[in-house]
Amino acid sequence: MATRHLSMRPADQGSRERFLDAALSVLVKRGVPSLTVRGVAEAAGASTISVYARFGGRAGLLDALYERTFDSLREMLESLPPSSSDGVADVLHLALEYRRFARESPARYALMFERPVPGFDPDPALRSAVLRTTFRMFVERVQRVSPPGADAQAAAYQLWTAMHGLVGAELMLASRTPLAEFFIPPTDEANEAVYRQGVTAMMRGLGLR
């Protein structure tokens, strides 16, 4: 894939993964302000020159980290084999695992779907590729339960936007002081129940069965 992060020879793959592990650790534990070439190099126990040599600069490093986060989501989706009898339950299961993925690391999720790093816009070719490959399985599951002749890709997108909105609101509220009088009690059980209800209602509205 021709993107801003440099292609690696097989011999360099191990060190590349070490840098990406360090970058993800910096993002999760120290936040976006520390996600610099110097910060990642220090976390990896290496020099800044070695980061530049492998990624070409901060934009290339961030592109590679962006790709890694989507690889993690794709691998999670691939670990959920569809059942042979209940396609609707399969879609709901996938939606619930998507929520778990987001809750496991809000910083990682923000890098994937928001603009937490000022000035960073993922390489367009990379962004197109990871979105297409990551959500392919989601579209396939929606297609399995869509009405005849329905546009499964459009339905999958509409369902994902509902999922994304519910998850985004939950993460935003969790990052702030809880409000006792808010619509949802500040518990994981309450949030999961609302998420499940919202996704189920959207699926019914799309005619998934």
Image (cartoon, helix red, strand yellow):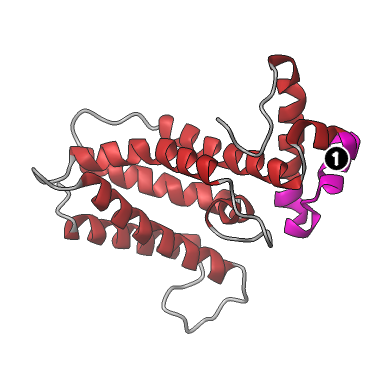
Residue at point 43%, 45% (across, down)? 97
Tell me: 41 left or right of 17. Answer: right
Residue 162 visible in the picture: yes
Residue 14, x across and y down, in percent: 74, 22
State the SS at label 1. helix
Horizontally, residue 44 falls left or right of residue 157, namely right
The kind of residue tagged 1 is Ala
Q: Quadrant of residue 85?
A: top left
- State the extent of the magenta-drawn residues as a range: 26-49
Tag 1 residue: 41
Give the residue displayed 42% in from the left and 35% down from the top: 133
Question: Is 42 included in the stretch rendered in magenta?
Answer: yes
- In percent of width and height, residue 39 lies at 84, 48
Q: Quadrant of the N terminus?
A: top right
Residue positioned 23% across, 55% down in the render: 203
Task: Single out the residue that lies furthest toward the bottom.
Answer: 181
Residue 103 is left or right of residue 147, and the answer is right
Q: Main secondary structure of the magenta part?
A: helix
